[in-house]
Amino acid sequence: ACALLGAVASSPWEFKDATATRYQKTLDECLRSFSEAVQASGARALEQLREHRYTPATAAQVANAYLNGLGLKDEHIAARRGLCLALGCLGQLAEPAGEAVLAALAKEARGQDLPGGADHEDPRCREWALLSLTRSIACMEEPPASVVEAAMMAVGACAQDYATDRRGDVGSWVREVALEAGVLLLGVAGRHHPEVAAQWCLPVVKLLVEQAAGKIDKLRCRAMVLLRWLFGARDGVELTIARVVQRVCEGIPYDGEVDVAGPAKQLEGWMARCACVRDACFAAESQELTQVSTAHVQAGEPAPDPDLAPSPAAGPSRAPATSDDEGETALSGSQGPDPEEPVVAVVYGEAHYALPRVVRLLTDTDLQEPVLRGLVLGAGGLTESTSRAACSALVGQLRGDTELQVAVCAHLVTLCGPEYPRLTVPTLNTLAVLLNAGMVPETEADTVVTATFAAVNKCKDPSRYRAAVRVLCGCVQFAGAVRRRAVGTLLQLLGHHYPVVRQFTAQSLYVRLVQEDGAVDLGENTVQVEQMDEVLEVLTVTPWGGDKDKIVQGRLQLYKSLQMPLPKALKEVAPG
């Protein structure tokens, strides 16, 4: 019905204003539907009605009506979604309606100051609001610099949307649109305001790189395709806001049209020369900062690594459509490529293919933190295949480069801090992997122990304690003061009020101390083999999940055998 209405509205037929009004009422009802498909159809018809039947005054009147709807406290979520989508179909509006629409869409995209408070928080609403905001700016003949900057700030906020509910990581919907909006707005800024493009080029690249190193296959693929497109490897149709709208609202992919051939070769070129690409993006003489010469990128391009590229004989394997949080299905490449699936999407969705290339950006100091923010979620996550690919890529990049190891450890210590609570556990797990692989320099070990202790101080999350225990056990490999601090912290955790923490600590410490051959240097003293045998026996026979009196006796024996001073809490219960 909406398609028919839109076709009639765009036809050369003449009809009265009352007919257009009835059409408008019908579309308003469609936009309030609980079906997203109906809302998308209504928005397409509204765009045709606006283009062929609206006057500027009518468009402003409709926009004000939609803005009033968004301001209602009792409006239901589905209606708010439709209103956000519809505002992007009204084109360039005269002031003051145009300014009010842009401000409202930016607020909805951020999810701030909603009239219904928490009841109006909805990821689809934020996704469609950001899409409409980008669409409104893209259709402006000369968008003001302040408008583009405000939209870029909204993109940055949406790119950090990690909201979850019973459906999973629903924030990924918003983040995916944020990546596309950032690239498109960067193109708008490059054409009209080069100074704004120069300011936002690196932040947009950081957003893309973080998701390219992440654990969700779909977002990784999207970010890699957009990075290629941003740096000039454009083999097919130009990326436009219309294609993004089709993907979001109608499910029509554009990946195969934007990038139709040779992804691996192009990707190798700019990954290996990322510093040169970045310099070219910020060059003052560049007229359009989002377009970099492919020839410049390919200069000095290394030969493709056969160990990292998928086997041509096997064909690309198909990437799972779900996120890693929902599980991952590994399909054999021997099944051959799906002729319906764009090759670019298949290859970029494979963690073992994309991540070894993304970690090469760690050599660029400006991109180290975003790469690691994305990478730790995969390396320290729960999905085995992604974790294995991320860990292998990171260890391979760090091997033999002490300077890079120091820089990466410094960033990981920062990510353990209270500013990144979402990343604390995966970061600790990543540090444990690097410690076991020998990729943490001894000079950084003391800092790692300090950060680990701070991460679990006054914590109530058992998973964080388990991750911290792995890191502390990894630090036991460093003789002297670092080992003494690590062992001392582990002994304190043996007295934790969570039985699961005590048990895991005892098991992990036992496994680690078994690996020590001979006397153990604790800095201030050396524990002989006989005492180490006593320590191992106590760790084995003490019921760490049960009787508290036996736990206290076991801890007292451990401190005595290791010749370490008792903590204050244990002194109070020690006999004599």
Image (cartoon, helix red, strand yellow):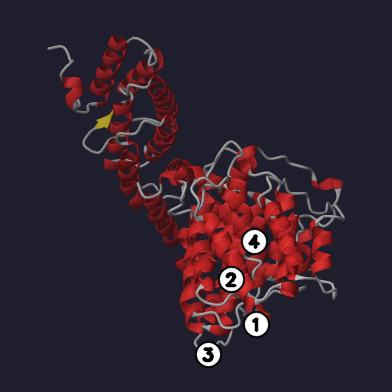
Relative to 178, does residue 568 appear above or below in the rendering?
above
Q: CA distance from mark 2 to mark 4?
A: 13 Å
Give the percent coordinates (x, y) of residue 55: 67, 76
Q: Is residue 268 left or right of residue 382?
A: right
Q: Residue 561 versus residue 287: which sits nearer the camera? A: 287
The disc, 2 or 4, on the residue closer to the chain's N-terminal end is 2
Instruction: Determine crowd level at label 1: few under 14, some 14-19, many 20+ residues with C-alpha closer than 10 A.
Output: few
Type of amino acid under label 1? Ser
Is residue 52 in sight in this rendering?
Answer: yes
Residue at the extreme left of the image, as rendered: 576
Say above or below: 348 vs 452: below
Identify residue for label 4.
86
- Disc 4, SS: helix
**Which disc is residue 285 wearing?**
3
How many angstroms separate mark 2 from mark 1 (CA)?
A: 42 Å
| SS state under label 1 | loop
**Which one is earlier in the sequence, the residue at label 1 or at label 3?**
3
Which circle marks residue 60 in the picture? Answer: 2
Q: Mark 4 and mark 3: span between their CA atoms?
A: 39 Å
* Above or below: residue 315 compared with residue 53: above
Q: Quadrant of residue 48?
A: bottom right
Dot 4 amino acid type? Ala
Q: Nearer the viewer, mark 3 or mark 2?
A: 2
Q: Look at the numbered discs 4 and 3 and tell me whether their residues touch, using CB distance below 8 Å.
A: no
Q: Which mark is residue 293?
A: 1
